[in-house]
């Protein structure tokens, strides 16, 4: 099971990465669990971002759901909380965090400066809306399908 979850996780399947992380954490393989939670977060899993945010608060009890044998790191915890909020608010759009290792690399890598933005959001904002269809084309297609060109709803038969 672990191999299957690992394979799916590192192909970008967020749920598999989170399940792998939980499995590893339960087995006390904390470093591997943290890596898997990082992968799940990168792939857009909100729960994993929350788990890392809590874990970097320096949870000391191995009985805690958030224990992963990590040193307290307030700034990392705050960044994962910001990531959690971002993913949560963009969940329906399928948000991901491909720049996670720039925003919140795992220790021992030091945290770089971060402007609070996400690559996924920048790319989404940069996309232009498609052009409005030509009115003549809209009229012709609406007539062919017996639709109201203003609403797209079927015309009522009198």
Image (cartoon, helix red, strand yellow):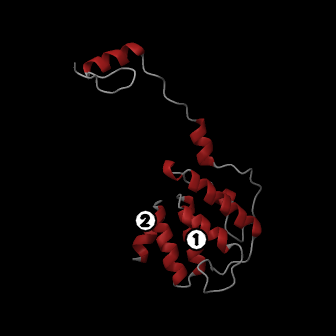
Height in image: 28 above or below 108?
A: below
Q: Which residue carries the number 1 mark?
A: 35
Neighbours of disc 1 within 10 Å: few (<14), some (14-19), many (20+): some
Q: Residue at x 54, y 70 (%)?
A: 36
The x and y percentages for residue 151 are: 38, 25
Q: CA distance from mark 2 to mark 1?
A: 14 Å
Q: Is residue 70 left or right of residue 140?
A: right
* Helix, strand or loop for disc 1: helix
The x and y percentages for residue 59 are: 68, 79
Q: Is residue 70 visible?
A: yes
Q: Residue at x 76, y 65 (%)?
A: 75
Q: Is residue 100 left or right of residue 10?
A: right
First-in-chain label (2 vs 1): 2
Q: Residue at x 43, y 21 (%)?
A: 133
The x and y percentages for residue 128 are: 55, 31
Q: Which residue carries the number 2 mark?
A: 8
Q: Is residue 145 left or right of residue 106?
A: left
The x and y percentages for residue 118 are: 64, 49
Camera-side residue of 21 and 55? 55
Q: Is residue 97 visible?
A: no
């Amino acid at each position: 099971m672990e191999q299957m979850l690992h394979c799916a996780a590192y192909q970008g399947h967020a749920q598999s990465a989170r399940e792998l992380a939980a499995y590893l954490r339960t087995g006390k393989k904390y470093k591997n669990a943290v890596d898997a939670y990082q992968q799940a977060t990168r792939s857009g899993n909100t729960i994993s971002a929350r788990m890392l945010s809590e874990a970097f608060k320096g949870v000391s009890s191995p009985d805690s759901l958030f224990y992963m044998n990590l040193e307290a790191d307030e700034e990392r915890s705050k960044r994962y909380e910001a990531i959690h909020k971002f993913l949560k608010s963009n969940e329906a759009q399928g948000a991901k965090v491909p720049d996670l290792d720039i925003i919140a690399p795992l220790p021992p890598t030091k945290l770089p400066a971060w402007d609070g933005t996400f690559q996924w959001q920048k790319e989404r904002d940069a996309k232009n809306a498609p052009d409005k269809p030509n009115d003549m084309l809209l009229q012709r297609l609406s007539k062919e399908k017996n639709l109201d060109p203003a609403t797209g709803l079927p015309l009522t038969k009198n």
